[in-house]
Image (spheres, rainbow, N blue to C red):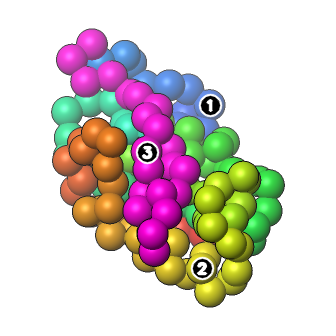
């Protein structure tokens, strides 16, 4: 990938695609009897686009939205979720639940309300 394209993804939105614009969609991810609050940032343009599961701190208050936006500008869909018991979500927080909730988010089939756009592949990134 050319370096100038990579740097532009940090600060510039791609041209608007009227047929398939970028979107920010609320999601509910089922995990062990509760629905996790999640956001799906979809990349502009006809897909499929690769999808990254972006996990925030444990439990943390940093959501890494800046990284999510840069990845989306670069052509990736980005799914962020809040673990059980964090950010006012249902359930009890525990480190074990973080692992289970990440697995639920990375499963792809757990995305609901409404179905997500086609997913080319899922990669997991944690900061």
Reading the image, the residue beneath label 2 is: 97
Residue located at (21% from left, 17% from top): 19
Q: Residue furthest bottom?
A: 96
Q: Mark 3 and mark 1 in contact (Cβ < 8 Å)?
A: no
Reading the image, the residue beneath label 1 is: 11
* Residue 67 against residue 126 in the figure, above or below: above
In depth, the one of 17 and 33 nearer the eye is: 33
- Of labels 1 and 3, earlier in sequence is 1
Helix, strand or loop at mark 2: helix
Which is closer to the viewer, label 1 or label 3?
3
Asked whether residue 25 is drawn in magenta, I would say yes
- Label ID, residue 27: 3
Q: Residue furthest right?
A: 61
Q: Is residue 67 visible?
A: yes
Q: Mark 2 and mark 1 in contact (Cβ < 8 Å)?
A: no
* Residue 12 against residue 47 in the figure, above or below: above
Residue located at (37% from left, 16% from top): 16
Point out the stretch of residues depicted in magenta.
18-39
Q: Position of residue 101 (x, y in %)?
A: 51, 72
Q: Position of residue 28 (x, y in %)?
A: 44, 50
Q: Quadrant of residue 17?
A: top left
In depth, the one of 47 and 82 nearer the eye is: 82
Residue located at (70% from left, 80% from top): 94
Asked whether residue 19 is drawn in magenta, I would say yes
């Amino acid at each position: 990938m050319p370096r100038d394209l990579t740097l532009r993804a940090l600060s510039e939105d791609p041209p608007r695609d009227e047929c398939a614009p970028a979107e920010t969609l609320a999601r509910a991810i089922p995990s062990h009897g509760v629905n996790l609050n999640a956001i799906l940032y979809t990349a502009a343009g006809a897909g499929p686009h690769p999808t990254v599961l972006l996990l925030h701190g444990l439990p943390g208050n940093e959501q890494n939205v800046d990284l999510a936006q840069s990845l989306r500008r670069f052509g990736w869909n980005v799914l962020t979720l809040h673990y059980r018991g964090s950010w006012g979500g249902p359930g009890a927080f525990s480190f074990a639940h973080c692992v289970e909730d990440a697995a639920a988010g990375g499963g792809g089939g757990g995305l609901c309300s409404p179905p997500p756009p086609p997913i080319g592949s899922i990669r997991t990134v944690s900061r």
